[in-house]
Amino acid sequence: MGSSKIIRTIVQKLFPFIVLFGLYLISHGHLSPGGGFQGGVVIGTAIILLALSYGIEKTEKKFENKRLSMLEKLGILTFIFLGFLSIFLGHSFLGNFLPLGKPGQIASGGLMLLFNIAIGIEVAAGVSIIFYALVKYRGEI
Amino acid sequence: MNPINISLLVFMIGLYGVISKNNLIKKIMGLTIMNGSIVLFFISIGYREAGLAPILGKGTTGGIPTTIFVDPVPQALMLTAIVISISITALALALIVRIYAKYKTLDIQQLSKER
Amino acid sequence: MSKEMKKVFFIIIILAMAILFILSIDIEYGNPKNLDVTNYYINQGLHDTGAINLVAAIYLGYRAYDTLIETIVLFVAVTGVVFYLRGKR
Amino acid sequence: MAIHIPILIIISPLLAAFLVLLTRKYKIILATTSIIISIVFILTLSSRILSGDKVIYHLGGWRGPLGISLMIDGLSFFFSLIVLGLGLLVIIYSIPERHYGRTYYFLLLISLSSMIGISFTADIFNMYVFYELLSLVVYLLIAYNEKGMALKASFNYLIMGGVGLSFFLLGIGFLYAMTGTLDISHIAERLPAAFDSSVKMVIMSFVLIATGIGIKIAVFPLHGWLPDAHSMAPSPVSALLSGITVEIGIYCLIRVIYNVFSTEAFSIIINSGHTILIVLGVVTLLFGAGMALVQTDLKRLLAYSTINQIGIIFIGLGIGTELGLTGALFHVLNHAIMKSALFFCAGIMIAKAGTREVQGLSGFIRQQPAIVFAFIIASLGMIGIPPTNGFVSKWLICLAAVEAGYTILAVIILIASAITAVYYFRVIQVLFSSPSKQNPVLINEGGQIIHGGNFFRTWTIYILVAGCLLLGLVPALGISLVKPAVSLLLYHVIP
């Protein structure tokens, strides 16, 4: 699998910008429409685009399945850990313990930015894992 | 025919699709249509006449904004409902791949006959 | 019951339920009635959570627990798909 | 630290579930310790809750209708105790099965944590999200041994469950449209005002939510998925499904009926709701009993008997008097214990005899007499013979029916118990008969050869059967557990 030269060069050029846009969506989740899920899906599709154009084997080397599923578990464990952290710091579960900062800036949402990042990692890894599983399934029972 | 009635109608079309179609994938499509119509229903509940998207302007520093905002709560709920609906669809499609691999048919009638 | 009879039967049921649903809607599209909690979110949202995007303020600030459970739903769906399609057993 | 207990009860199995995925050797130890921690935590709350007090925990520190809050009262305490107790036994029962990998324990822990989450949450949308998580996990658990039939059963359940939960979500949409909040107690306060303005919408939202949950509880017309799902699942999962998952659906129904649509203004809904419950209960009761008679597959027979017992619980709820409610909730506890014991015994029998057909289990008494006696005691409980707990709860419901003037209900319950007796004794009679063919090879459902039911499996069955007899001989024990829940529901109805 792997497609023509034209697609490969375009994808090779576009890939960093798509990931950058995904990161923008994640980091500005609490300022503009967007957030962990949308940004994660954008990054996931960037990886899928790479896989479609360069073929599964090469992408597998760059983003192997093992590391992606570890990233996914890491995303959720950080989310739960943040919840526990707010308990240790005297707030109730998932309560915000960081200073709110000035509205309009990235660092303004308190815990929200960290939540968005955790969700973004988990969704990006999850989407690409599903894609790998669907593509590599060879139909035996 | 405001969007609330339309969303209920689409919900019914999805329900009809789930009940009467024999093909497994069409049943899943019916389920997705139902979930989609629920998202439309919630959003049209929260709509306010000439309301803006609930993003406060860059400048407001927490003062009481005079502009009318659309109700943000259903939109927040629907983010969750959308993710749930794609999870159900993803799981169902993976299941259909396995069922097809074993029984080589997608017709629910034939499936229920085979042991 | 023959095939067409069954289909017609389903259509009648669905239409009846649809009419029943639509007749029961009393809210006027465009101005929802009880907005006290929503107005609190709009007025105090920025003050409480520091987020300009009020939707994000709600689903990450006030109702972060919902979002935690929902990411777990997505995680279970991913593990489910991988579990079904790993194929090598 | 003590005020954070409600959330820690839910999160400890959740956290353990993710840690189980990371470790290879310690999965069982992690699973059991997390459930034991939750049990210890909930027992520390028991004194406060049994005295009628309510434990409220605001997540994220947001008061009232703003954020999500957890509320543990008599009812949720009762159901979460059943979930944790049986969950622990299900985990212990599946220890000897080496075929169950990390994913199995991950899914089991997530299902237990989501069931406790459902019983604790005071926010109706959060209840929907947890219910969805529970359903997703159960679809996977049913199809865990990946045989053709199990995949089909899981698919059917997925479609029915998906439709059911969409109805539930639409009902929540109606409630939000009318009241503007999602917190159950605040919805209950604001519904009478909405009721005056639009009677139709309140009734429609009740109908939507009731049908949605009805599908998940497998009430008579919407039960199609239950027999396949419960019988095709691996035995510990069938016990989990029949014992606990159905009960959580009943919990949601009780919570909706008594907390959301509670005040006198809805007397027409509640009265008509009660009669509908009774009618559905009777139909489900007779249908479950009738279908169980014709079953040849042992686990399908037990699945249909689950539908039968749900009918009895519905009748108890439908009567609605204090005695009726006590009987119904006590029967929920008894049914959970007895049905899990039956499925556990069935798991061992099927594993040793290598076939699911009742006829194939002939002469099992010689191989494992203890398991057969446990099966007998549990089936006596299901029928409702005096020494066991089943008798006490069925007797309470019959008494409530007679007191409330529905004497025909009591008669119907007795008839159904007679039918139950017929199909259980038929199984027991086969167990005692001479073995028709000796089957030396012990195959388990997953195709691996396993050694006989060893220490873990037999002891979980003994604990359950001891529970059966204990609650039967000393019913005050169970009723004291149920008392705070019933008094909460009937007297101070709006929490």
Image: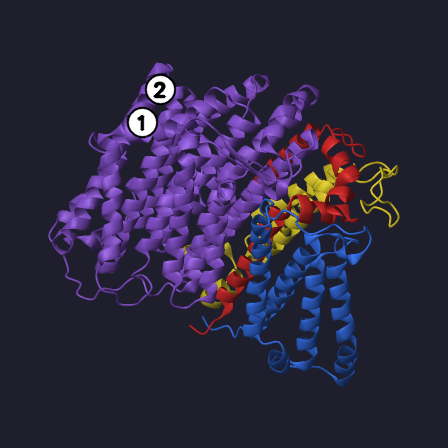
Residue D266 coordinates in the image, percent (x, y): 58, 20
Q: Residue at x 87, y 45 (%)?
A: B60
Q: Residue at x 38, y 30 (%)?
A: D329
In three-dimensional space, the C-alpha distance between marks 1 and 2, rounded to whole angstroms, equals 10 Å
Residue D130 coordinates in the image, percent (x, y): 54, 46
Do marks 1 and 2 share a subunit? yes
Residue D484 appears left or right of B53: left
How many numbered badges does the structure rendering display?
2
| Chain identifier for the purple-coloured part of the image | D
Q: Residue under label 1, please give it.
A: D413
| Chain identifier for the red-coloured part of the image | C
Amino acid type indicated by mark 1 = Ile
Colour of chain B, in one word, is yellow
Residue A27 coordinates in the image, percent (x, y): 74, 60
Closer to us: D62 or C87: D62
Q: Residue at x 54, y 53 (%)?
A: B22
Residue B106 appears left or right of D29: right
* Chain assignment, label 1: D
- The image's colour scheme reads by chain
Q: Residues within 10 Å of mark 2 (few under 14, many from 20)?
A: many
Closer to us: D415 or D180: D180
Whether residue C12 is visible: no
Closer to us: A1 or D46: D46
Mark 1 in CB contact with mark 2 (< 8 angstroms): yes
Amino acid type indicated by mark 2 = Ala
